[in-house]
Amino acid sequence: MAGRVRRPSGNPDETLFRAAARRTSDAPLADRMRPTTLGELAGQRHLLGAECLLTQIIASDRVRSMILWGPPGTGKTTLARILATTSRSLFVPFSAVLGNVADLREIVAAARERLAFEGRHTLVFVDEIHRFNKAQQDAFLPHVEDGTIVLVGATTENPSFALNSALLSRCKVFRLEPLSDDDLATLLERALRDETRGLGTRHLSADEAALRDIARGAGGDARRALSTMETVADYLESTGGDRITADGVAAAESHRPLLYDKSGDEHYDVVSAFIKSMRGSDPDAAIYWMMRMLEAGDDPLFVARRMLIFASEDIGNADPRALTVATSADAVLRRVGMPEGTYALAQACLFLACSPKSNASTVAWHRARDLVAQRGSLAVPKKLRNAVTKLMKEEGYGAGYQYPHDHEGGVAIGERYLPDEIASERFYEPTDRGEEARIGARLAALRKARGD
């Protein structure tokens, strides 16, 4: 039984130090340079500072089940391995893609036996835990609860949506942030000098600007930064060069894909930045975030759809042309396609960002909807009902209605159109911005004339 247990668990007898010993020059630089101690781990100061919870958990040797949430290359797997080492637990990787419930049962059986006879805990590391379905996630619950295993899950997706509430309630979530350019530059310099795990034996030098370019291009991803530098170093070796320059980095980075998952957090974060930039009247930021979406392969019709919504939600009557511009951009995009459709999208984006802003229309329909929910179906005043039959006329339908065009200015002063029960309610309050300032002045005059 014990022999069968060890095979699907990913060689659980492997320790962090044995793994490190097997790292040869044939392994990718990013793998060779994987930190083995907290001191080597770059970034994440919000988690690993002296007074931070995670630091205290590690120092007290009380590692509990947790979820490590963050973008690729921020140290989730590395941190899990270090947690296993510092707590003297066995590190058992479990694949959310290839593993199944039967494999988990074998891992749990071995963990229970190990805890009973050796007093040693088992840290089960599940990368991409968001790929598990609900049943697979539920399979962990009893073993996490009774302490048979310590579960450390890693995910690039928001755990609030990717994990079921039962599992999430039993795990502390730690958010890992993208590494800063300074952190990445430090890692690159370390790899350049390290003669055991890095590139030190190649005796390469590097321009500071080149390392900064690599760091900046990695988008906070240590793995990507180290892989890029290794690519440049391999090219230099093949040409007899010995110095990493900005030109060499540019050549290696010419086809670098953008960090962007159209179904994940990065997508929604960029969309949020796009909308907030337009709302904040910053055309430079708005066009930048829009191009981030388009260059990463997002659906341009999605971008157009967001601007259509924005035109009414955030501009409204402050500039009624905004909806026309957004609608026209959508129509042009559908007619000419991409990449030419970018012209129309860019024009609309900049127009919307520069337009005066008002959410008065949004507030108005929200207020009206809420009152409808509170008061139900109030009767339509009889004077506003159409008297299309003799019986309706006899019932008083339409009686007393004042036809606005028969009055000066096209307004029937004194007429009321809301049900009597809510006659004093006000839903639309124009702002003093853009066209809405003129609308507001006229509306105020009308309300005053009606005695509102």
Image (spheres, rainbow, N blue to C red):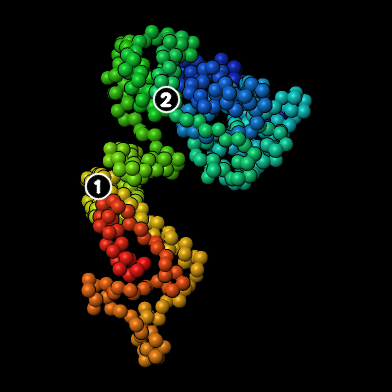
Which image quarter holds the C terminus?
bottom left
Q: Looking at the image, is mark 1 or mark 2 earlier in the sequence?
A: 2
Q: Which mark is residue 261?
A: none
Residue 244 in sight in this render: no
| Residue 368: quadrant of the picture | bottom left
Q: CA distance from mark 1 to mark 2?
A: 33 Å
Q: Which residue is mark 1?
A: 351
Counting from the top left corner in percent of width and height, residue 147 is at 71, 33
Q: Residue at x 42, y 70 (%)?
A: 423
Q: Which residue is mark 2?
A: 180
> Along the line of sight, which residue is nearer the eye, 4 or 74?
74
Seen in the picture, residue 197 relative to 276 is either above or below; the reply is: above
Counting from the top left corner in percent of width and height, residue 397 is at 38, 84
Q: Residue at x 49, y 36 (%)?
A: 156
Q: Residue at x 45, y 76 (%)?
A: 379
Residue 254 in sight in this render: yes
Seen in the picture, residue 394 relative to 267 is either above or below; the reply is: below
The three-letter code of the residue at mark 2 reads Ser
The three-letter code of the residue at mark 1 reads Phe
Counting from the top left corner in percent of width and height, residue 336 is at 22, 51
> Along the line of sight, which residue is nearer the eye, 133 or 298?
298
Q: Residues within 10 Å of mark 2 (few under 14, many from 20)?
A: some
